[in-house]
Image (tube, rainbow, N blue to C red):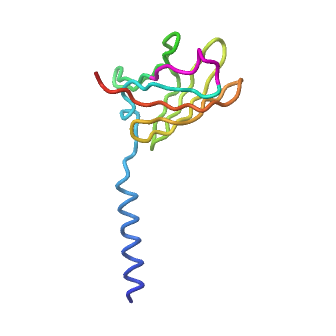
Amino acid sequence: MKTKLYTLMILAVAIFSISAQKSITADDLIGTWKYMISDVPPEYESGFLIFEQKENKTVGYVEAAERQEVKNLMADQGKVTFTMESQGSEFKYSLMQKGDTLTGIISSQYGDFPIKAVREAKK
């Protein structure tokens, strides 16, 4: 009997823990994120990801040498994806958000590159 009760309690705690996890949405991205990309030339290593509300929609920009709007921005349950074109090439971003950190991969014709972005403090 104690074993059944113990198992039931563990199951209940697990269910409540799963249901209490927050689902990250596009609204949770709003802000400026400083990014670092590994294994690329120095001029491409860092910049900013900027997410803002525009006409009741979340839009994003990648800002390095210039500011470019991202396409196909999707954010659901912690996963953030979008594409960006630069110098005739397409770059696909696949990120996971955990608090104020985004980590993931940028895929392009040049290969896959690790990226990490940290949300900047609001000014």
In the rendered image, residue 47 lying in the magenta stretch gets the answer yes
Viewport quadrant of the C terminus = top left
Name which residue lies at 60% across and 17% down: 42
The reply, left or right, for residue 35 in relation to residue 107 is left
Q: Position of residue 62 (x, y in %)?
A: 50, 19
Relative to the observer, which residue lies in front, 120 or 78? 120
Name which residue lies at 37% across and 35% down: 28
The reply, left or right, for residue 96 in relation to residue 8 is right
Residue 8 higher or lower than 50, as above or below: below
Q: Position of residue 7 (x, y in %)?
A: 42, 78
Q: Position of residue 108 (x, y in %)?
A: 67, 25
Q: Which residues are magenta?
A: 40-49
Q: Based on the displayed image, in which of its 4 quarters is residue 17 positioned? A: bottom left
What count of labels does the image hold? 0
Residue 79 higher or lower than 12, as above or below: above
Relative to the observer, which residue lies in front, 111 or 80? 111
